[in-house]
Image: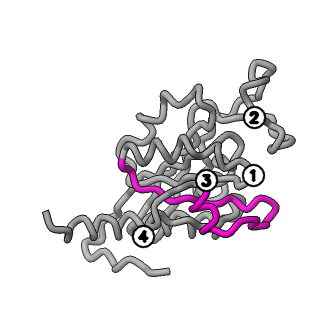
Amino acid sequence: MSHRPPNPSGRVTSAKIVIAGGFGVGKTTLVGSVSEITPLTTEAIMTSAGVGVHDTRQVPGKTTTTVAMDFGRISIDRDLILYLFGTPGQTRFWFMWDELVRGAIGAVVLVDTRRLADCFAAIDFFEHRRLPYLVAINCFDGMQYHDPQDVRDALAISSDVPVVACDARNRESTKHVLISLVEYVLTMRRTRAVAPA
């Protein structure tokens, strides 16, 4: 993993990253595992109104859901602070996504390989808005069941979009995902800067 050159100005740079994905994929867990502040969450108890709306068969024991956003913060080094905004996973809250992505440098699309179709809408959303994103395969139970290339093929995404495995419960694993996204965004910006007009 490459490291950014030191910031000679000594100024702290901050950046906004959006964490997206389907219902119950681990977005709240990811934000909570890496945030150096107590994360702000908007979890609500799921009620009978969600029957037929939430498919909880693949996420047994899930009793709450995000109804607005999750928010956390992590200092990657002395001069880079990332602000994390986790999106709600259900389609009825997607009206908030435009506001949540405003000013973001990029996004993490967290996927559960048992329910890959749940992340198609998030990928389409970021591609349509030309927001750089990477795909993070959440390895539930600490097991990676599918090769990243197989996931890339199944999602039909560009070969330059990073696909990485992670454990959303593990701080170091999640931090690696965020650093990979920042490096990808910086590479894309450098490439655009030198591309002929």
Q: CA distance from mark 1 to mark 3?
A: 12 Å
Q: CA distance from mark 2 to mark 4?
A: 33 Å
Dot 1 lies on which element?
helix
- Amino acid carrying label 2: it is Thr
- Amino acid carrying label 1: it is Arg
* Residue at left offset 49%, top offset 48%: 18
Let me know if residue 134 is in the magenta part. yes
Q: CA distance from mark 1 to mark 4?
A: 28 Å
**Residue under label 1:** 114
Q: Magenta part of the protein: which range?
A: 130-154
- Please say if the residues under marks 3 and 2 sit with CB atoms less than 8 Å apart: no
* Residue at left offset 41%, top offset 34%: 99
Residue count near mark 3 (Cα–Cα under 10 Å), binned few <14, some 14–19, many ≥20: many
Q: CA distance from mark 4 to mark 3?
A: 18 Å
Residue count near mark 2 (Cα–Cα under 10 Å), binned few <14, some 14–19, many ≥20: few
Image position of 120 (left or right of 191): right
